[in-house]
Image (cartoon, rainbow, N blue to C red):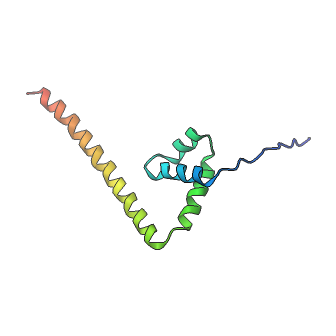
Amino acid sequence: MEKTIINKKRRKYDESFKTELLKMVKTGRSVAEVSRTMGIGENLLYKWKSVEKSQETPAETLINLEIEQLRKQLRQVETERDILKKALVIFGRGT
């Protein structure tokens, strides 16, 4: 069996491109969505995310953790609000 050698050229991405993609992830878009949209591998985006996280100061880490928790709470509250809106419509029809 012959092995075929695939000569893939690695693409180089500049720092501003990496920063922009990481910003998209930080603002709530999923890694999968960003990677699909921009045509890069998810693993590469996770690697960039990991490198960026390792370069954070402890204060930045705490701030980013708090932001992440607040975003999670906001999503929860938005979901509850949407459910209540639907319930209001349903129960409003009965009267």
Asked where in the image residue 68 lies, by quadrant, the reply is bottom left
Which one is in front, 79 or 39?
39
Q: Spot the residue most to the right.
A: 2
Figure check: 90 above or below 16: above
Q: Position of residue 12 (x, y in %)?
A: 70, 50
Q: Check the image and name the residue furthest to the left.
A: 95
Q: Is residue 23 left or right of residue 84?
A: right
Q: Considering the image in quadrants, where does the C terminus appear?
A: top left
Residue in the image at 14% along x and 32% along y:
91
Q: Quadrant of residue 80?
A: top left
Q: Name the residue located 58 percent from the left edge and 41 percent from the top edge.
A: 38
Is 63 on the left-hand or right-hand side of 35?
Answer: left
- Number of residue marks: 0
What residue appears at the point 83 percent right and 42 percent down from the top-left corner? 6
Percent coordinates x, y for residue 47 in the rendering: 61, 57
Identify which residue is drawn at 22% across, 34% down. 86
In percent of width and height, residue 25 lies at 49, 50
The residue positioned farthest toward the bottom in the image shown: 58
Compared to 92, does 54 lie above or below?
Answer: below
Q: Quadrant of the N terminus?
A: top right
Q: Can you say whether 8 is above or below 95 in the image?
A: below
Q: Quadrant of residue 9?
A: top right
